[in-house]
Amino acid sequence: MTYVRNSSIEDAQFNTLLLEAIDRSLADSLGEEVRNVVYLYLKAVLFLKKEDIPKELVAFHAGLIKLFGSSATLVEDVIVKELFSKIGVKFSAKDTFVNLVEKARTYFVLSKKKKE
């Protein structure tokens, strides 16, 4: 039972870090107004709220593709670099955005468990 509770706490901590990385990356690379437009678009067109992004990475990725086309990869790379920096892991862009975020999640959760 403790494992499930700790996992939820660690997932929540990771989700917070992910949202912070997304927020900062969008604002720093595109500007705050464009960041806000991205969130409005995701909510209005894909019915994806900002707080649901960590659970809906595929939808978030699809939304970025619809908005930015092939340039979405550049935005995603900035997000992943920021996220990996937050959890103290070296960034290596040899995978998809969704897979890299899930690898970061796994690393984060496992590293927290090792410290217990």
Image (cartoon, helix red, strand yellow):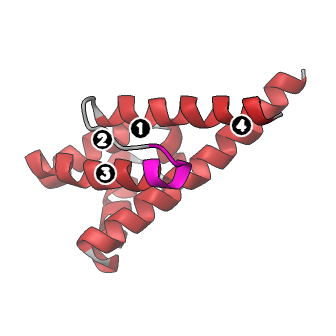
- Disc 4 to disc 3, how far (Cα)? 36 Å
Residue 57: numbered disc: 1
- Disc 2 to disc 4, how far (Cα)? 27 Å
Q: Is residue 107 magenta?
A: no
SS label for mark 2: helix
Taking 51 as reference, is 100 left or right? left
Which numbered disc flags the more N-terminal residue, 4 or 3? 3
Which numbered disc flags the more N-terminal residue, 2 or 4? 2
Could you tell me what secondary structure mostly forms the magenta stretch? helix
Taking 39 as reference, is 109 left or right? right
Which numbered disc flags the more N-terminal residue, 4 or 1? 1
Q: Could you classify mark 4 by the number of other residues whose Cα lies within 10 Å: few (under 14), some (14-19), or many (20 or more)?
A: few
SS label for mark 3: helix
At 41% across and 37% down in the image, what residue appears?
57
At 50% across and 50% down in the image, what residue appears?
18
Taking 69 as reference, is 9 left or right? right
* Residue 37 position within the rendered picture, expressed as x and y whole percent measured from the top left: 30, 69
SS label for mark 4: helix
* Residue 42 position within the rendered picture, expressed as x and y whole percent measured from the top left: 35, 54
Which stretch is magenta? 84-89
Q: Quadrant of residue 24?
A: bottom left
- Which amino acid type is marked by label 1? Leu
Closer to us: mark 4 or mark 1?
4
- Residue on which the image places disc 4: 112
- Which amino acid type is marked by label 2? His
Q: Could you classify mark 3 by the number of other residues whose Cα lies within 10 Å: few (under 14), some (14-19), or many (20 or more)?
A: few
- Residue on which the image places disc 2: 61
- Residue on which the image places disc 3: 45
Q: Could you classify mark 2 by the number of other residues whose Cα lies within 10 Å: few (under 14), some (14-19), or many (20 or more)?
A: some
- Disc 2 to disc 3, how far (Cα)? 14 Å
Q: Nearer the viewer, residue 94 or 66?
A: 94
